[in-house]
Amino acid sequence: MSLFEIIALVMSLTAVFSYINYKFFKLPITIGVMLLSLVFSLVLILFGSLGFGFEEKAEQLLHQIDFNETLLHGMLSFLLFAGALHVNINDLREQKWVISILATLGVLTSTFLVGTATYYLLNWLGIEIAYIYALLFGALISPTDPIAVLGILKLVGAPKTLETKIAGESLFNDGVGVVIFLVLLGIATGGSEVTPSAIIGLFATEAIGGAFFGLGLGFVGYWMLKTIDNYQVEVLITLGLVTGGYALAEAMHVSAPIAIVVAGLMIGNQGRSLAMSDVTKHRLDNFWELIDEILNAVLFLLIGLEVLILTFSKQYLIAGLIMIPTVLLARWIAVGVPVQIMKKVREFTPYVITIMTWGGLRGGISVALALSLPNVPAREPILAITYCIVVFSIVVQGLTVKRVLKLTEKDNV
């Protein structure tokens, strides 16, 4: 199939599933589309087992779509920018220490806890895995997915301080998690020097370099927006900033996700208040909100379809079911310990640990990173377990986080 035919099929399926969900199920659009695409995939598998051959054609199509490339080197830049555009930088500044600690030490702690648990669990189940690949799984599943998290935050009505913590952490721990993943992948494949100084140097170059590059990118975009007043051109400037900036950051080997988040925060705050007319603000917000909704729906459709090309066995499913509460426990520890320490010097929303644990959703980024693993024996079990956790996270946690928030509020009255 040609690229246009693939895009046409994906967009058509997304539109049909969005319509069915809105008409009959009334679920949040991303969750509804993912569930319908998952059911669609399972029906194709059933038909395939009956000899109809639909499954094989669908698999061939999906193999033409590189999920890792599509998300990490395409859609992610737009989704991160759209998310960062609406985060208040003053609110973020007030929570900077909480967000910084959770996005760095929290992710590192969770990576170690999940990785260690995975190593012992899989070997106990008879699935041999090297410790470094167990840690790689810990790195790809520990960061909360900003795409999934920000989509749910729009619906739950969390207190402002709590919303800022969750949104800020998800925007930055994504970039940090990718850096940790790349460091561990380099060690696993022998592509990186395994010394503390080399690892710290790579981390600093990627994360800190990405932040400074994002500042420069945001300043250039802000200056261009400030010198004109034409919303069509200003929307084009933001598009160029996202696509060109992300590609340039990757070419410079700095964290492109962190760079785009920082640039998005600058444009969404200084750019919005000092460089845009009311007409431009309105048009720009509408444009990026639409981009966000469309790409989110497409992404979650692809997540549901990915089940067609994954290998599942009884052992993998058991491991996936056991790892769901294990990952949640690691998240609870990684959030809870820093928060308990910081409670001595600052106030937190009641039940903040419970809400941030349950509201820390995993999504497409985890699947994309798992798919980027080299073709080693550990790849298939890691992919299957990652998929189980992501589906549970989006469907169960995504649909119940609002209830958890209401229960904690009611209990606090």
Image (tube, rainbow, N blue to C red):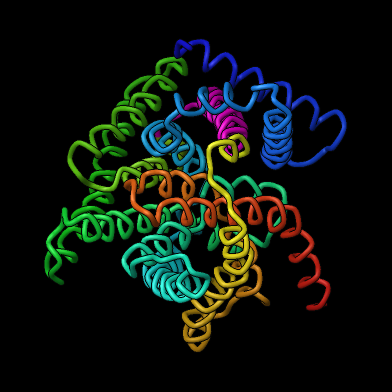
Q: Is residue 267 left or right of residue 50?
A: left
Residue at the image point whose x is 58% and y is 62% from the top: 315
Residue 220 in sight: yes
Magenta-drawn stretch contains 61? no
Q: Is residue 130 left or right of residue 340?
A: left
Considering depth in this image, is 189 or 177 the residue closer to the camera? 189
Residue at the image point whose x is 69% and y is 25% from the top: 51
Give the residues drawn in magenta, as a range.
275-303
Magenta-drawn stretch contains 293? yes
Considering depth in this image, is 51 or 92 the residue closer to the camera? 51
Q: Is residue 404 left or right of residue 221?
A: right
Residue 282 in sight: no
Q: Position of residue 52 (x, y in %)?
A: 70, 22
Q: Position of residue 288 (x, y in %)?
A: 53, 30
> Would you say the magenta stretch is mainly helix, strand or loop?
helix
Kindly give the residue lying farthest to the front in the view shown: 51
Hey, which quadrant is residue 53 in on the image? top right
| Quadrant placement of the C terminus | bottom right
* Count of picture labels: 0
